[in-house]
Amino acid sequence: MATEMAAIVPLKKMIAICQYGGEFETNEDGSMSYVGGEAYAVDLDESMQLSGFKQEVAETIDLAVDGMLVKYFLPGNKKNLITVSKDKDFNRMVSYYKECDQLEVFIMKEAAPAKTPMKKQPARRPQKRPAETEVAVVQAAETEVAVVQPAVDLGPTSVVPLNEIVDIETTNEIAPFPDPISIDPFPMSVIDNEQHIAAKQWENVITGVGQRFHSLAEFREALRKYSIAHGFNYVYKKNENQRVTVKCKSEGCPWRIHASRLSTTQLVCIKTMRPTHTCQGGSIKPAFRATRSWVGNLIKEKVKDSPKIKPKDIANELKQEYGIELNYSQARRAKEYAREQLLGSYKDAYSELPFFCEKIMETNPGSLAIFNTKEDSSFHRLFVSFHASISGFIHGCRPLIFLNSTPLNSRYQGMLLVATAADGDDGAFPVAFAVVDEETDDNWRWFLTELKLAVSVVGQITFVADFQKGLRESLPEIFGPECYHAYCLGYLAEKLNKDLTSHFSHDARRLMVEDLYAAAHAPKLEGFEKCTEDIKAISPKPTIGSFVANELPITQMIDELRGKMMQLIYTRRVESSQWVTRLAPSMEEKLKNEVLKAHSVQILRSHGSKFEVRFGEIIDVVDIENWDCSCKGWLLTGLPCCHAIAVLESYGRSPYDHCSRYFHVETYQLAYADSIHPIPNFERLMDIELDDGSIVVTPPPAIRTPGRTKIRKVAVGPVGPADFLKRQLQCGKCKGLGHNKRSCK
């Protein structure tokens, strides 16, 4: 049956922003505002019709097509909602916004009508049409009919056109057929049965008339796989909650299939099928299409087995195995969907925060797990510090804390603020972390305030940080004027290199960065001044400017960090229990090197505890009682220098007794003495009735920006000048940067 359709104006490119789950509020002027809910983007195709649009929305939002209402505002009119009930309405809506890049629609559920008994109608007998070649198979409620193979010439068998088939179980009035609609937004490549072996497993997911499925959704899934395996595309002629009719998309091809629900059951049965293609199936090389949710389910096991798999690797594997072609963004969205199915909703994870924080402090007594929300109950910030980290820092680490931040690559983004220390083996020791909606002065101040509560028994602390917002003012304000604020050498060198990129060659910048490192490590003033003079010789005015599972839902991310920290503490505790040296391995190695050099040192007694020490032509003064040497090596490293070791050994003293206590194995073991305890699995809050007035935390209002988030890697160890300074392309003709001889203009 033909349906009158209005032509859709060709679109340059349009996206429908689908608002769902919120509600309308009426303003004083009578206009309406949509509050709450979530927004989803759906591409609009120039040939799309209402049924196709609803199908796209249904698979994006996970909402049934039946009972879905689509509404929108006319341009410039926010007082009257227009309902889209047929294809003409849909075309009119698109036409109104044809000059725009996007339009806003509102998706709602239609109220369920009251059930009224219906008079049972007798089944209508199909009539023959000689031009058709399809075998109609009609099933009574309890009768099974054998599958008829269409490859045989059936002659004058009863033949019925597909769009007139009626199931005797169905009592509803037959709805008119809409025009065929294309499905889904992901393109797929040609299926090569020899190459795409994984798709061959789907060749027989549909066997023919009489095959049963548990639901229409299961049938649609089988149909999609079947079409991929056999290399053809299809369109829906009917797509309802009781029956589905599908035909091959190639014009004139007789392939069709019809399935409907069996009476009084949820089972779905294939009633008729023409399995032969005159378009020759895969040999005509049609384009396939698939949805984000469907591809996400397809790769779910891949993501489960390899959580760190890259979108480009997903795209490559799907092309090789199934012939599905995805670009980077499509693969990333499919991976995001798969992760959500495995780990839970990003949105729901925020509502679990109150309960999750309680569980952290319940299972790990002495820990801090605090969260804040804004006035509208949306997430603001979260601070976590486990008791094992607090105790380990206080008893086993130097009073030195590194502060850093990195953006989170999750749906709602945000920032991760981290406080780490250094253990006795120069390993990174986790102290505390926070998740905040954005990096601001206020959020850094709040993080430092909570950190002060956790480590309040520690006296003077030195903080090493980059130029994070508000730290310069917040540190002395919260920790007192006696705290020190040092800058990260790696970031200073990186900033220097960046500032000089357009002014100096790669070699010149490399030399200046090396001199910067040498100046920072110079133990004496004269050495520091020499390095700075070397920098000035190259540039008289150099300018120095101003563990993360970051894609998971917030509670899963916290638990993932907790698990990594728990494993780190356990592993280092076990390893250190087997050490037989007095110092941690790296410090033991450094001390042994100084002991070897001490054999060439000449000692002269000066006065009291002071000694004159000669190493070749260099003369230094060692003060044994004050643990000091004029070379400043003892003071800077916490380990006796070769000059001090020579003096100590001449008096029968052990250099181990004059090493910083933080480097001794006993102190190292204290840092990892306490454990982080597991948090048992708990029911998701969406399944718990919150009738006790508990706070329901909602996600922050941040919207993911296009493209990949730029992640700055957090340095976990010492960074050398060659770790980030990579050679830039330089032209051999004009000596300019960023191009070669061939592209030189």
Image (spheres, rainbow, N blue to C red):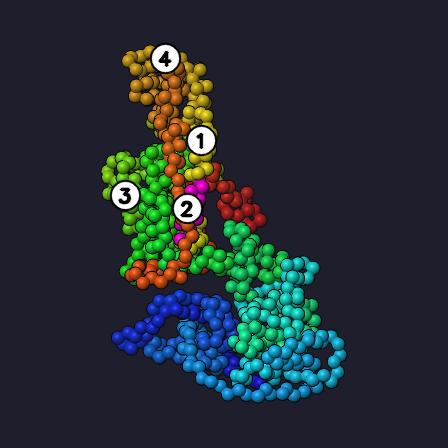
Residue indicated by mark 4: 651
Q: Which residues are magenta?
A: 555-568
Q: Which residue is mark 3?
A: 453
Quarter of the rendering occupied by the N terminus: bottom right
The reply to whether dot 1 and dot 3 touch (C-beta < 8 Å) is no
Q: Which numbered disc flags the more N-terminal residue, 1 or 3? A: 3
Q: Marks 1 and 3, how far apart in space?
A: 31 Å
Query: Amino acid under label 2?
Result: Pro
Residue type at mark 3: give it: Leu
Q: Is residue 40 visible?
A: yes
| Marks 3 and 4, the one that precedes in the sequence | 3
Checking the image for residue 577, the label placed there is: 1
- Please say if the residues under marks 4 and 2 sit with CB atoms less than 8 Å apart: no
Asked whether, in this view, residue 362 is left or right of residue 181, the answer is left
Q: Given the image, on which type of amino acid does mark 1 rest?
A: Ser
Residue topped by disc 2: 678
First in sequence: mark 2 vs mark 3: 3
SS at mark 1?
loop
- The x, y position of residue 407, in whole percent, is 40, 51
Give coordinates of residue 479: x percent, y percent: 26, 40
Q: Is residue 200 found inside the magenta-colored segment of the image?
A: no
Q: Secondary structure at mark 2?
A: loop
* Badge nearest the viewer, 4 or 1: 1
Q: Are marks 2 and 3 in contact (CB under 8 Å)?
A: no
- Pick whichever of labels 4 and 2 is earlier in the sequence: 4
Q: Mark 4: few, some, or many residues within 10 Å (few <14, many ≥20)?
A: few
Q: Is residue 152 above or below residue 287?
A: below
At a point 39% along the width and 15% down the height, the residue shown is: 649
The residue type indicated by label 4 comes to Tyr
Mainly helix, strand or loop, the magenta region?
Answer: helix
Q: Position of residue 258 (x, y in %)?
A: 61, 77
